[in-house]
Image (tube, rainbow, N blue to C red):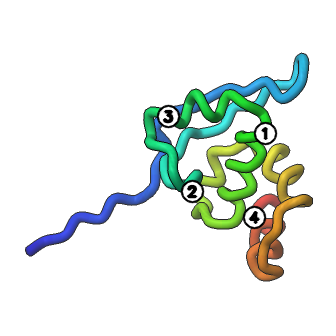
Amino acid sequence: MKRTLRFAKSIGRITCELSPGNEITVPVVPGILKHPRPEELPALLSRPSVVRKYTMLALSKASWPILRQFPRAWLKLCLENARLKHSRRQALMFLLG
């Protein structure tokens, strides 16, 4: 029996207003947030607190092809506050260079 593996991929992009005049556009990737279904993600990611948590989780478990879809400046900003293993933090700092 042949098994097909599905890799994580973006199903779209969502723009969230973090503060008046400050917007961020992030990819919508099912699986970064544990429980929501893919169709629920766009509504959830319209809230700034959820986008921050989503980005922190992406930094800790998403692959580089997924992280490349996020704005670099936003990843660097979130990397400062993320709880990551030292080796993961160093690798991300190098990739975001």
Element marked by disc 4: helix
Residue at the image point whose x is 44% and y is 42% from the top: 37
Q: Position of residue 8 (x, y in %)?
A: 45, 55
Picture quadrant of residue 52: top right
Mark 4–mark 2 distance (CA, rounded to whole Å) = 11 Å
Crowding around mark 4 (Cα neighbors within 10 Å: few <14, some 14 to 19, many 20+) is few
Residue at the image point whose x is 13% and y is 71% from the top: 2
Q: Which residue is under mark 1?
A: 49
Mark 1–mark 4 distance (CA, rounded to whole Å) = 25 Å
Compared to residue 26, the image places residue 61 above or below, namely: below
Q: Is residue 6 left or right of residue 80?
A: left
> Which one is closest to the eye, mark 3 or mark 2?
3
Mark 3–mark 1 distance (CA, rounded to whole Å) = 16 Å
Mark 3–mark 2 distance (CA, rounded to whole Å) = 23 Å
Residue type pointed to by label 1: Ser
Q: Which residue is under mark 3?
A: 40
Q: Which residue is under mark 2?
A: 65
First in sequence: mark 4 or mark 2?
Answer: 2
Callouts 3 and 2 close, C-beta under 8 Å? no
Crowding around mark 2 (Cα neighbors within 10 Å: few <14, some 14 to 19, many 20+) is few
First in sequence: mark 4 or mark 3?
Answer: 3
